[in-house]
Image: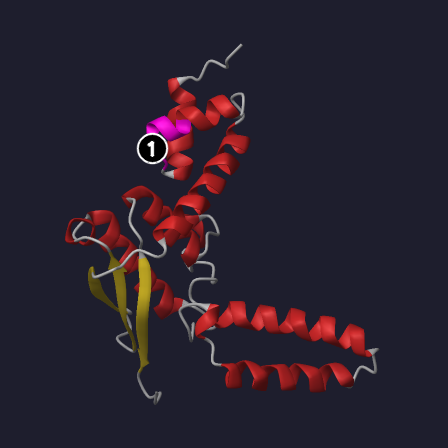
Amino acid sequence: MSTEVSAADVKALRERTGAGIMDCKAALAESDGDIDKAIEILRVKGQASAAKRSGRATSEGVVDSYIHATGKVGVLVEIQCETDFVARSDEFQEFAREVAIHIAGAHPPPSYVSADEIPEDVRAAERAVFEAKAREEDKPPEVIEKIVEGQLAKWAKDVTLLDQEHVRTDRYEGKSVEDLRAELASKTGENVRVARFARFVVGEAE
């Protein structure tokens, strides 16, 4: 016997995930009406779709800017997509602006878009610092290795834009910049990519 899916549940699921009506109906039917399970189903399907989209060319997009109210912090960010139609959409423009706002207000500010952009020499230097500190605690080598790996992963997350939780926590309920990018990619059906950014602070050299 199939589960009856109500319009109210579909609406609630759409508001929480941004997924399409038919996708929400299918997920609710598959989860027997359990919204939390339906969200997980949509998340898994969305990740699979995102993997397919990630290899597609992004030759359109926007460059957006944000200047903090103090006039002392400014950000430029380039967000790419596949078509000019999506690039001109309100949702895409808003995402670009929100990324710029995050970069301006993040503490610590991001240094790289994604973890795979971190140069090996920079990563090695951080590892050396963590290893030196761990050795001071006189722990076995295997324990030191676990401690260092954990600290290195946390450091990489702290300096990577996509991994950072958006500074507007209340508005985005603790979602990361990558979560917001993935949601937009799912809604538009296009490969959305944060290409690069620059953060300027008065009195600070690059």
Residue 37: name its quadrant. Answer: top right
Residue 38 percent location from the top left of the image: 50, 31
Q: Which residue, given by chain and number where applicable, does mark 1 sit on?
A: 20
Disc 1 residue crowd, few under 14, some 14–19, many 20+, Cα 10 Å: some
Question: How many marks are shown on the rendered structure?
Answer: 1
Residue in view at x 76 percent, y 77 percent: 144
Q: Magenta segment, principal secondary structure?
A: helix
Q: Is residue 55 left or right of residue 156?
A: left
Which of 64 and 150 lies nearest the eye of the viewer?
150
Residue 81 percent location from the top left of the image: 25, 56
Magenta stretch encompasses residue 23: yes
136 to 85, vertically: above or below? below
Residue in view at x 42 percent, y 51 percent: 51
Q: Is residue 108 left or right of residue 125?
A: left
Residue in view at x 56 percent, y 73 percent: 155
Callout 1 secondary element: loop
Which of 145 and 95 lies nearest the eye of the viewer?
145
Numbered range of the magenta stretch: 19-24
Q: Give the amino acid type for the residue marked by disc 1 in the picture.
A: Gly
Residue 184 percent location from the top left of the image: 33, 48
